[in-house]
Image (spheres, coloured by chain):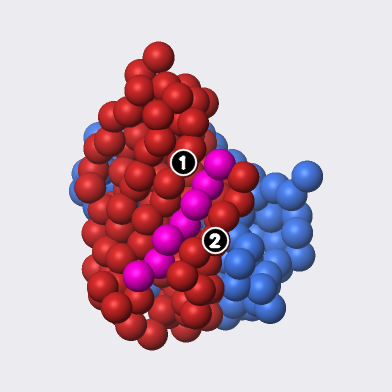
Chain colours: A blue, B red
Amino acid sequence: DVKVTQSSRYLVKRTGEKVFLECVQDMDHENMFWYRQDPGLGLRLIYFSYDVKMKEKGDIPEGYSVSREKKERFSLILESASTNQTSMYLCASSPSDRETEAFFGQGTRLTVV
Amino acid sequence: GEDVEQSLFLSVREGDSSVINCTYTDSSSTYLYWYKQEPGAGLQLLTYIFSNMDMKQDQRLTVLLNKKDKHLSLRIADTQTGDSAIYFCAENYGGYQKVTFGTGTKLQVIP
């Protein structure tokens, strides 16, 4: 059974903290993505990576950075968390040669207080 | 990507058909997708349609694509309570990284 695993289901952090969200996939996929999901806004792409150490900005990269040191792991970093980053964060992965497959993690609900 | 719009809420009775609609704006889309998100879970790819197709049927699911009007729909026949979820349409306009998701439609199935 294919899996995308996010390290936490729920997180509560304080304003100004540095926050790490981790995502691991076991399918040897080249592409990995971080989205945030907000009611009425759907999913918005923060960053994606198409290979180890490669990354590209999505639609809303401000306030975020990412790291992909190994193929299976993609980390989202909030350098200084703010209350407007309270959201559901979803990680996804896909193979580079098939546009009809994508797998999502279960999501991390982050609350910044 | 451009805007992908969906109505936010749909309520149907168990056993009826559900039709979830989506409009998109990018005419260069290659694939269009429907995802399902159950409460507390991530998204699961339900089905997809290639942009040169008009219709695709997969068991209880029927996808209709009207390229002229840039309109995509998902019909669920014999809707069950287990179909209660949020449904997202999405368009791929150039490789998987270029995917735009809609706002999601919350389907409520009334027993």
Residue named by callout 2:
B56
Indicate the position of residue A79 as horizontal and vertical percent values.
Answer: 36, 58
State the image coordinates of residue A96 (x, y, percent, origin top left): 65, 76
Query: Can residue A77 be seen in this snapshot?
Result: no
Magenta residues span B60-66
Total count of labels: 2
Question: Numbered disc 1: what chain?
Answer: B
Q: How crowded is mark 1: few (under 14 residues within 10 Å), some or many (20 or more)?
A: many
Using the image, tell me which numbered label, if any, was put on residue B76: 1
Query: Do the residues bearing badges 2 and 1 touch, measured as CB atoms within 8 Å?
Result: no
User: Residue B41 placed where, x, y %?
Assistant: 51, 36
Q: How far apart are marks 2 and 1 (CA)?
A: 12 Å
Q: Earlier in the sequence, mark 2 or mark 1?
A: 2
Among the 4 quarters of the image, the one containing residue B11: top left
Which residue is depicted at the point 62% across and 45% down? Answer: B59
Q: What residue type is labelled 2?
A: Lys
Say which of A18 and A73 sits in front. Answer: A73
